[in-house]
Image (cartoon, rainbow, N blue to C red):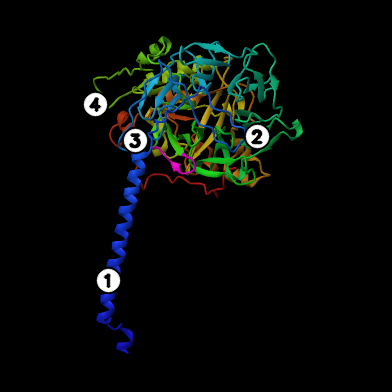
Amino acid sequence: MAQDFFPQPMPWWRRGCGWLLSLAVLALLVLLLVAWGRAAWQAETWRAPSPTPTPAFTSTPTPSPTASATPTATFTPSPTATPLPPLPTAAPPALDPAQGLLVFALQDGPRVQLFAYHPQRARWVRLTQHPHDHLYPRAVEGGRNLLLTANPNREWDLYYLDLTTGRTARLTREPGYQAAAALSPDGVWMVYEGYTEDGHLDLFLRQVRGIQDTPLRLTHDPAADYAPDWSAQGRLIAFVSTRGGTPQVWVADLDRPEVERFHQVSDPEAGLVVGPPHWSPNGRYLAWAQTQAGLAQIYVWDALQPDRAPTILGEGHEARWMPDGEQLAVLVRRPERDFFTLYRWPAGLALPLIPLPGRAYGWAVGVTGLAEPLPETFARAARLTPTPLWVPVSVHPDDVPEGRTVTVPIPGVDAPYPYLSDSADEAFQALRAAARERLGWDPLAGPLTLFTPFTDPQAIPLEHNWLSTGRAFALDPAWLDTGDMVVVREDYGPATYWRVYLRAHNEGEGRPLRGLPWDFAARLDPRDPRVYTEGGAWAPTPPPGQWVDFTALAEAYGWERLPALPYWRGYLPAARFNLFVLREGLSWEEAMAQIYPERVWTVPEWLAPATPTPTVTPTATP
């Protein structure tokens, strides 16, 4: 058996033939290589040298005749163009320097201002510092100009911003609200969202140079239609609409009659659309963001394969195609701040998350017209050093130990205990003044809840009640019933947050509500137990009127929102939708220790009353 299993040794004469055959093959290979190298050297000696090709740039991209062709991103360098930033040597650049400049509209104190940024330079440059807002910037005409929305006269209109001179030109003059415009490929027409007399947010068409012309109304649905984008072929307009019950992406085909013009491209089963759609430069792909179960993801739909399910690219709340059509600039929202990143199509993440210095209200990609040196209008804003929105002034009595503070009275407020911590009163008064200016009424005059002694009955467990720290306030929930407040639900993973909007009495300071608010009162309807277990439902339509994002305004002054407690669906006070906290990096225990002697608020475990936690069966968010 052993002889059958192990191979027998090879005879000596066969081993010798094998060595001779190997040497012969090796010699033949050497002769062939020498002959080929000599022939190549002779051919190179007799070949005439050819000139080095020089890349040619044109002023505008060549239009693509079909949806499948991909145009080459081109630009015209000028003598005053911004010098390109140095490229990193540690890794290949994620952005082409010629198309990598971005312009963000960021919350900066009480207003939204424009900032220029290039990821490879990693430096923010302020471009505006005006007492009004600048929203939804979009690069046009090869990136030399911006199309944006602003309200300098308390009227929301569309403007051109010339990046080489800093001058603006007003494009619309109708009363009311016109915003978020996109140009047709030939630059003659624009589509934008506008607020109608009957209280609807709809889409309109008009010629760019036809300021005096009556705009053409594209949509007439009672639902909200907003955030349009025009395809490169000029015949399709994508937008977000709530006409199906929840925000979803729809496309209008301008070649079809009105009854057949609109069709939905996003899948409601994938969740709510939270970011506006954006076409790729060649008009083939459409990108948007949808969120489900607390996860927002970027979806890319192929218009040449409309029945095929969209591709999920990765996490994100808003996407913009870069001019090369191979990368997407993506906004990622988190409860505490916004981030920016890049995705390669279709590979995935190309740039780590970059924190933004403020909440973003749109941004422009492919900007090429920012001059160097900056125009004086931009230069003044870039040199500006913003002053603090509020400065704490300490009142420290001699009998208060070091490291602790006191509560101080807040004049002119309707609250059971009109006091706040001495560390928070100036921030509260600064926010109050800003809110009064924006809204035309004083929401922080009350009724509201400020400081609540820990000895009082607590609606939620004490360790979650920031009102006992003197660093929080709670708006009156009755404003939900009066129509002065609406709340939008935002899920981040398993946590639920709320965005509070207050009705603006100052015309031109608020904006129409784009999304759908959350209706807590729907949980009281006995006909639908699912709505009760979910803690409410999405309202069927946005409420009319103009609204100010109070949550964003409060964040600018340091006041944070907190997530709802896990049992909020069955117990409304646990939702904490109306609560705002000036944490300044402190934990609840540290904030309590600032105004109370150490651990005086601690109750022995055997003496503490049990806090019942309602048992609620979680269901998926519609």
Q: Are marks 2 and 1 in contact (CB under 8 Å)?
A: no
The percent coordinates of residue 429 (x first, y second) are 42, 17
Q: Secondary structure at mark 4?
A: loop
Classify residue 18 by image quadrant. bottom left
The percent coordinates of residue 608 (x first, y second) are 39, 44
**Numbered circle sitting on residue 20:** 1
Q: Are marks 3 and 1 in contact (CB under 8 Å)?
A: no
Which SS does the magenta portion mostly show? loop
Q: CA distance from mark 3 to mark 2?
A: 48 Å
Residue tagged 2: 251
Q: CA distance from mark 3 to mark 4?
A: 20 Å
Q: Earlier in the sequence, mark 4 or mark 2?
A: 2
- Taking the magenta stretch, the answer to whether it contains residue 564 is no
Q: Are marks 1 and 4 in contact (CB under 8 Å)?
A: no
Foreground: disc 1 or disc 4: 1
Q: Secondary structure at mark 2?
A: strand
Foreground: disc 2 or disc 1: 1
Q: Amino acid at mark 3?
A: Ser
Q: Earlier in the sequence, mark 1 or mark 4?
A: 1
Residue closer to the observer: 591 or 148: 148
Q: Are marks 3 and 4 in contact (CB under 8 Å)?
A: no
Residue tagged 3: 587
Q: CA distance from mark 2 to mark 1?
A: 75 Å
- The residues colored magenta run 344-351
Q: CA distance from mark 4 to mark 2?
A: 65 Å
> Outermost residue, bottom direction?
1
Residue closer to the observer: 232 or 71: 71
Q: Quadrant of the N terminus?
A: bottom left
Mark yes or no: residue 514 visible: yes
**Numbered circle sitting on residue 401:** 4
Q: Residues within 10 Å of mark 1 (few under 14, many from 20)?
A: few
Q: Amino acid at mark 1?
A: Leu
